[in-house]
Amino acid sequence: MIVEISDYGERNGRKFIEYSVSGLSKDQLDYLKANLEGDIVVNDDVLALTMHFSDELYPFQSEVAKFRLDDFIAREEIEMTVFLSSFLEDM
């Protein structure tokens, strides 16, 4: 499984992160579509997952994140990979 952040920021007054997830089987894609919360779209075996955050929980809001954004993006991709992997264990 490969998780990459494809977009992030604020849309319509809501902070969001959009993840692109590839390398999943059809069964895994179907399971995630049926059980995950968030906006989900699957195109060409790539899952696009958009998660919305409150201001307090948005991971890119701190002053440190502004200077070390690449580190924060990498950390968020790793955390989502771990979350999705543990979620798929329940399949």
Image (cartoon, helix red, strand yellow):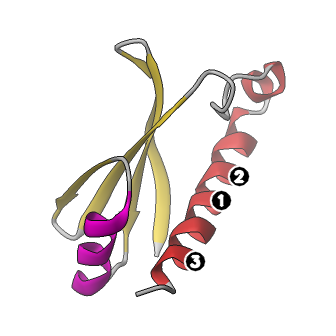
Q: Where is mark 2, residue-wise?
A: 75
Q: Is residue 45 above or below residue 24?
A: above
Looking at the image, which residue is at 65% across and 61% down?
78
Q: Is residue 69 above or below residue 39?
A: above
Is residue 33 in view from this perspective? yes
Q: What's the CA distance linking mark 3 and mark 2?
A: 17 Å
Amino acid at pointer 3: Ser
Q: Is residue 85 magenta?
A: no
Task: Label 2, secondary structure: give it.
Answer: helix
Amino acid at pointer 1: Glu
Check contact, mark 3 vs mark 2: CB within 8 A. no
The mark lying in front, picked from 3 and 2, is 3
The mark lying in front, picked from 3 and 1, is 3
Q: Position of residue 3 (x, y in %)?
A: 49, 62
Q: Where is mark 3, residue-wise?
A: 86
Q: Position of 58 compared to 25: left or right?
A: right
Looking at the image, which residue is at 22% across and 70% down?
45
Amino acid at pointer 2: Arg
Q: How many residues crowd mark 3 within 10 Å: few (<14), some (14–19), many (20+)?
A: few
Name the quadrant containing residue 23.
bottom left
Q: Is residue 33 magenta?
A: yes
Looking at the image, which residue is at 59% across and 55% down?
77
Q: How many residues crowd mark 1 within 10 Å: few (<14), some (14–19), many (20+)?
A: few
Per the rendered image, the range of residues in magenta is: 26-36
Q: Where is mark 1, residue-wise?
A: 79
Q: How many residues crowd mark 2 within 10 Å: few (<14), some (14–19), many (20+)?
A: few
Q: Is residue 20 above or below residue 53?
A: below
Q: Position of residue 15 (x, y in %)?
A: 49, 24
Q: Nearer the viewer, residue 67 or 63?
A: 63
